[in-house]
Image: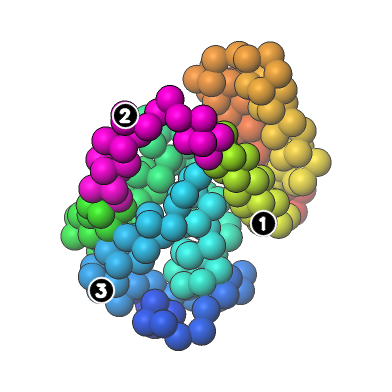
């Protein structure tokens, strides 16, 4: 992929949040790999219970580096590719702005300091795992993580207005995925490839039909 030059300025220097970019407007990017490293390090350190919710808030709402539609597109691809979603997202975001230097900066910010904290937490958990207070804390964090994911999904739902499938079909696919994975316990890979292929086919059909009707 060819790195894109950063446009304009970003609100990563402690100034007021940039807010989500307007649709169709140029989207500002990080001014340097160092700024990208610090941004991903900051969102990684905030990601208790899940980083994706924090990534959406930081990259879209606070810094304004991505529009909601761009974030949804990158997240969709990150979920289909093998590996952790946030790592795939970091690689795509870094490459988008600074090529291989951006990839190293984004991954470094995402992994370096949190890795040290995880090692320390793992050592502590091995010692206190059987303590009832620790068990209750982990269960509570599970509820927090579920709330973060739900809030992020609701925030990003507005971007479906411009989706060629339209909101009703998108909602139907989302509900089908929830039932297959959450209720029927079908394999995630089969659901992703099955519903993903169906969604792609429906989107292509809708786009071709709209082109021929013009």
- Main SS of the magenta part reads helix
User: For this view, does 31 lie left or right of residue 195?
Assistant: left
Q: Secondary structure at mark 2?
A: helix
Residue 177 sits in which quadrant? top right
- Residue on which disc 2 sits: 126
Residue 196 position, x and y percent, is 58, 29
Mark 1, residues whose alpha carbon is within 10 Å: few (<14), some, or many (≥20)? some
For image coordinates 66% across by 51% down, the residue present is 151
Q: Secondary structure at mark 1?
A: helix
- Residue on which disc 1 sits: 155
Residue 210 position, x and y percent, is 72, 47
- Residue on which disc 3 sits: 32
Check residue 117 for magenta coloring: yes
Residue 146 position, x and y percent, is 62, 40
For image coordinates 25% across by 73% down, the residue present is 32
Decide which of tag 2 and tag 1 comes sooner along the chain. Answer: 2
How far apart in space, not on screen, are marks 1 and 3 (Cα)? 28 Å
For image coordinates 23% across by 59% down, the residue present is 105
Residue 150 position, x and y percent, is 66, 45
Residue 4 sits in which quadrant? bottom left
Decide which of tag 3 and tag 2 comes sooner along the chain. Answer: 3
Q: Is residue 60 visible?
A: yes
Magenta segment range? 114-137
Single out the residue that lies furthest toward the bottom.
15
Q: Tell me, for residue 21, which label it has, or none.
A: none
């Amino acid at each position: 992929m060819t790195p894109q030059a950063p446009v304009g300025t970003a609100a990563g220097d402690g100034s007021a949040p940039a807010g989500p970019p307007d649709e169709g407007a140029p989207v500002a990017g990080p001014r340097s790999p160092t700024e990208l490293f610090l941004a991903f390090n900051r969102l990684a350190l905030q990601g208790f219970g899940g980083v994706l919710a924090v990534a959406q808030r930081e990259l879209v709402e606070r810094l304004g580096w991505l529009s909601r539609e761009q974030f949804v597109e990158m997240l969709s691809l990150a979920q289909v590719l093998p590996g952790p979603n946030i790592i795939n997202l970091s690689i795509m975001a870094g490459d988008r702005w600074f090529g291989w230097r951006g990839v190293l900066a984004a991954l470094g910010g995402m992994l370096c300091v949190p890795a040290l904290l995880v090692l320390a937490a793992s050592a502590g958990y091995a010692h206190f795992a059987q303590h009832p207070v620790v068990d209750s804390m982990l269960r509570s964090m599970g509820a927090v993580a579920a709330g973060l994911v739900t809030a992020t999904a609701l925030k990003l739902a507005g971007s479906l207005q411009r989706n060629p499938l339209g909101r009703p079909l998108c909602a139907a696919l989302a509900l089908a995925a929830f039932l297959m994975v959450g209720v029927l316990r079908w394999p995630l890979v089969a659901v992703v490839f099955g519903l993903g292929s169906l969604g792609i086919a429906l989107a292509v059909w809708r786009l071709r039909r709209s082109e021929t009707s013009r």
